Image (tube, rainbow, N blue to C red):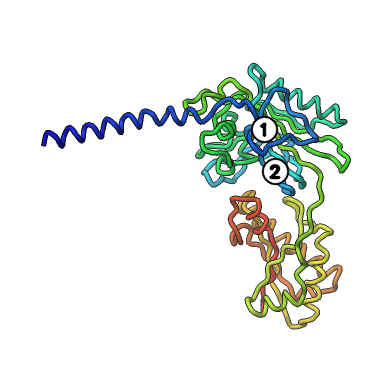
Amino acid sequence: MRVHTIACLAVLAVLAVLAAALPIAAQADAILPTRDIAGARDNPLLKRYEGSFIVGYERKAFGEFRLPLAPLELTQATDHMNNRVHAPRRMLELEGAVTRLVYVAPAERSPLEVVRNYEEEARKAGGEILFTCKGRECGGDPARTTGGGGGDTSLMQYFLYEKDVKDPLLSTGYCALVERMTDQRFSAARFPTANGDAHVAVHAYQPMDSHSCRALAGRTIIVVHLVEPKPRESKMVVVTAADMSRSINSTGRIALYGVFFDHDKTEIKPESEPAIVEIAKLLRSEPSLAVLVVGHTDNVGGFDHNLDLSRRRAAAVIAALVKTHAVAPSRMRPAGVGMVAPAASNDSEEGRAKNRRVELVKLN
């Protein structure tokens, strides 16, 4: 019995040593950088702040970006972390090549100094500053970066959440984007390029001193989002009237991704015309067919707002078919389901794009 007790005590002692060592190992993950992370590079359109290093990097050849032009204000929505969502009254809905660069600035550089340098670069390029804010003036929780639930969203959470951070847990890049912060400064600017206007958002702040990310305490983190003007690669094949007919006759419905709207708008964009033409061909080829035109949205925005928006978009499709293609309005009925019937997860931009669609559903 005594031997068994001694053995148990020895095991417990080993476990205690291992447990004590875990915080030290975790602490060692976040270090001050001395070089850029592998695969990262500056964008040719914008220089970095001198002496800083890249600790986080992501680039999309074509994507969406919402550039705030006003402080965040409380909305009626909540997010997946049960936060009260804050959003700006004014913003620019941008499309193009989107690059996110996360830098650690040299010692003794304040967020204000960093942001002013980026603003100077934008002006030198012939650009203009569209919006600036600091601290609580930015709206939402001024101490949060990408993490946290059960409170108010932050300016950083307007762009991305902790679940979107691809850097390894407690790495320097992870700590830069997840650790709580102080002294935030934000600036949005536009400047001309050979291909049109580029837009940049610069968010600078200092992480709070914490056990796991202590290496970054007192350093300024710089998060740069740069949106370059770039035409979207057209890889979508227009769904033909014959394709629509086959799907409706076999499944009772067809999902269409060729009808486009600007963010939060109901006006059909000109590039939607090929899809509208094919819908009209379908209805002309099958004179007895009647359809529901159903609008779908992603989960960005309030439930009731998206429900109304999706119905008004469906009505806009019907109006276009009646006005420009002489389809009888009695053969079509608008419906909007908002975010109720997603085709994919709303946790990524790719999924949200699949959820923004118009469907034709057989009515008779």
The reply to whether dot 2 and dot 1 touch (C-beta < 8 Å) is no
Across and down, in percent, residue 274 comes to 82, 66
Q: Residue at x 74, y 49 (%)?
A: 62
Q: Nearer the viewer, residue 64 or 91?
A: 64
How far apart are the two marked residues, 2 and 1, measured between alpha carbons? 13 Å
Foreground mark, 2 or 1?
2
Q: Which residue is mark 1?
A: 223
Across and down, in percent, residue 217 comes to 56, 22
Residue 59 badge: 2
Q: Is residue 272 above or below residue 277?
A: above
Say which element carries label 2: strand
Across and down, in percent, residue 239 comes to 75, 70
> Badge 1: how crowded within 10 Å, few (<14), some, or many (20+)?
many
Is 13 placed left or right of 145 in the picture? Answer: left
Q: Quadrant of residue 142?
A: top right
Q: Quadrant of residue 227?
A: top right
Say what amino acid the circle numbered 1 marks.
Answer: Val
Q: Which numbered disc flags the more N-terminal residue, 2 or 1?
A: 2
Q: Residue furthest left?
A: 1
